[in-house]
Amino acid sequence: MSILAELQRRFGDAIVETHDHRGDPTAVVAREALLAVLAHCRDEVALAFDVLMDLTAVDYLKFPGREDGPRFEVVYHLYSLTHNHRLRLKVRMDEDDPNVPSAVALWPIANWLEREVWDMFGVRFEGHPDLRRLLMYEEFVGHPLRKDYPITRRQPLIGPAS
Amino acid sequence: MGVGSFFTSKLDEAIGWARKYSIFQYPFVTACCGMEYMATACSHYDIDRFGAGLPRFSPRQADVLFVVGTISHKMAPVLKRVYDQMTEPKWVVAFGVCTCTGGFYDNYATVMGIDTIIPVDVYIPGCPPRPESVIDGLMKLQDKIAAQAQRY
């Protein structure tokens, strides 16, 4: 049974949308079910996604054809060393509520990946143990990879740490 | 000895001559310009001919700070601290357009020229500058060192 069919059978409506382009399975998951889906992907023997390859986000502001849809998507790339297969999970959220449950309890690497997404996109991860900026410095204002961040905005220079 | 007297100016010249041929540089290398810096420093172009052949990897032992490569906002305090740790007399060379003006970077991460943080003596533009440009900049710095009023 394919990965997507297995997920749909188990989670039903929580799997909002799927596609499988050239053996590259992708599922859009409802935010409420995200942690359950992630935990199932990791722990189910037939799936065994033991590696979180990447966790990133996309800002669809003014994206052609998606102007009215949810603005942000957080993307999880999973990989199974046991079965040598991959899965991409996406979760969508609106501009006024950029919150996702944290996956740190499932994959420790999510700690820094979620901090990077928070830093760059301003998406909050509920339950993250230490949600600080990862790449930019603390005095930085805004989230630079958001599409409405002004490209030439000047940030104040920071001095040597005292 | 008063300023302008014959002996003082000759001593200044002697010290300037000595200083310009004993440049101990601190290479603050952060990016691709480092490759051109290495090419310049190695035997083919050989900046040892100009007395600048010995890089010191401690700012306290260095005379010239070579800032080689893009400086991000997060790196800026580090660069400032390295500069502050250097002892007088000291000079700064901005190596490559990123250090001169920010270069083609105009974004949230990059400092728009290191002269917004520390004073710069010689700007070497180029992306990256060829070794000939670097040597030209180094010779201009030597002229500047020789010509300036020496403090000792």
Image (spheres, rainbow, N blue to C red):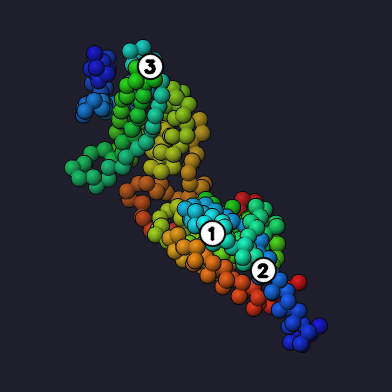
* C-alpha gap between disc 1 and disc 3: 52 Å
Please report, as a chain letter, where disc 3 is located: A
Q: Residue at x 37, y 36 (%)?
A: A56
Image coordinates of residue A85 in percent, x first then y, are 32, 21
Image coordinates of residue A96 in percent, x first then y, are 33, 40
Q: Quadrant of the C terminus of chain B?
A: bottom right
Which residue is label 1 attached to? Answer: B44
Q: Does residue B53 appear left or right of residue A100 in this picture? A: right
Q: Residue at x 31, y 31 (%)?
A: A91
Q: Residue at x 81, y 83 (%)?
A: B1
Identity of the amino acid at label 2? Answer: Tyr
Let me know if residue A81 appears in the view: yes
Q: Residue A4, located in which quarter of the rendered image?
A: top left
Q: Which mark is residue A82?
A: 3
Q: Residues within 10 Å of mark 1 (few under 14, many from 20)?
A: few
Q: Are marks 1 and 3 on the same chain?
A: no
Identity of the amino acid at label 1? Answer: His
Q: Does residue A49 appear left or right of residue B54 in this picture? A: left
* Relative depth, front residue between B68 and A92: B68
Kind of element beneath mark 3: loop
Image: A42 above or below A109 = above
Q: Residues within 10 Å of mark 2 (few under 14, many from 20)?
A: some
Which residue is label 2 attached to? Answer: B21
* C-alpha gap between disc 2 and disc 3: 63 Å
Let me know if residue B72 appears in the view: no
